[in-house]
Image: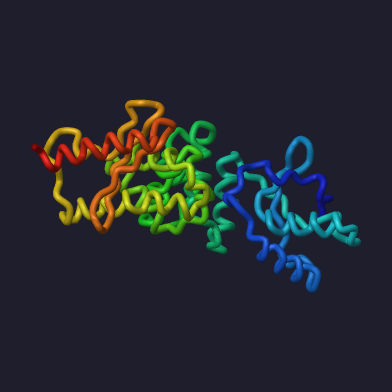
Amino acid sequence: MRIPLDQIDLHHIPRDRSAIDRDGLDELRESILADGLRTPVEVIATNTGYGLLSGYRRLTVLRELNDLGLPGFDTIEAMVRTPETRLDALRQMVEENEIRRDVSMWDRARIAVECVGRDTDTIDSAVAALYPNVTKQRRHRIRAVCNVVVWSDGALIDPHTHTTRKLERLAAAIAGGHGDHLHFALTSTRTANTAAAQWEVLKPILTEIDLTNAGKLPRDPRPNRPRRFSKKSPRLQIRRIHHPDGWMLKFTGPDASGLLMEDIMDEVERLVNPI
């Protein structure tokens, strides 16, 4: 059946994409202009019209063509589905995207986290319900990245751009008890304003964790050691950073002045060169 575009709610359910590739939309638009819409979208009947189930990119392109005033693009061919629950609707959307395999690991995990508290009680049950047909290993990987989504709490910029390997390194570090250090590093570095810049902040921490776990860096046997960061003062934050050439201390905050650095240099000299 054909449905007017203005009767379809694009955001009736959460989408499992953080961003839409513009080049991909342009290619789809040229295809539709040349050959028409080959695959109907899927919708759910609502009290006010229809909610989109699958076909976000197709509906977006047709709306753009309709906005240009092109004739014949004010309606769209659609199939009406009748999922029993909202979670079942989300599962159908996820399965349709899994076929194309162009959804990031971050978005696979994010949609599961968004279900908790409304559609399911736990992340485990959300992952099991949304991804019943993927392998056990793949569900385990999605579950691990769910921990990164929860840990991030909005701190990561454009997280959908990170590779699965990067997200799994973060998941392993968080599971190992390093979440506070990683989060502190992100929030105390003002210049980390892109996904790439944030990764450069996180990378040395993850490398130190990997080297320590591999026995290539000695473990400090003292309780609560090593101390990787200190934020006793709200105006001064200190981070210990591993570097291939050695170690660095990074001071940030309003009190991180040149005069303080001089005092610290004096104290370091007294420590390493006692009289």
**Position of residue 274 in the picture relative to residue 213 (left or right):** left
Q: Residue at x 61, y 53 (%)?
A: 19
Q: Residue furthest top?
A: 233
Q: Quadrant of residue 58?
A: bottom right
Q: Position of residue 68 (x, y in %)?
A: 87, 58
**Position of residue 243 in the picture relative to residue 165 (left or right):** left
Residue 107 visible here? no
**Position of residue 210 in the picture relative to residue 192 (left or right):** left
Q: Is residue 152 above or below residue 203?
A: above
Q: Is residue 110 above or below residue 21?
A: above
Q: Position of residue 99 (x, y in %)?
A: 55, 62
Q: How many numbered marks appear?
A: 0
- The colouring scheme, among rainbow, by chain, secondary structure or one colour, is rainbow
Residue 165 visible here? yes
Q: Residue furthest left?
A: 275
Q: Residue at x 70, y 69 (%)?
A: 27
Q: Quadrant of the N terminus?
A: bottom right
Residue in the foreground of this view, choosing between 204 and 158: 204
Q: Residue at x 67, y 61 (%)?
A: 22
Residue in the foreground of this view, choosing between 205 and 124: 205
**Position of residue 208 in the picture relative to residue 197 (left or right):** left
Q: Quadrant of the C terminus?
A: top left
Q: Position of residue 16 (x, y in %)?
A: 57, 50
Q: Residue at x 50, y 45 (%)?
A: 110
Q: Position of residue 55 (x, y in %)?
A: 68, 56
Q: Quadrant of residue 136?
A: bottom left
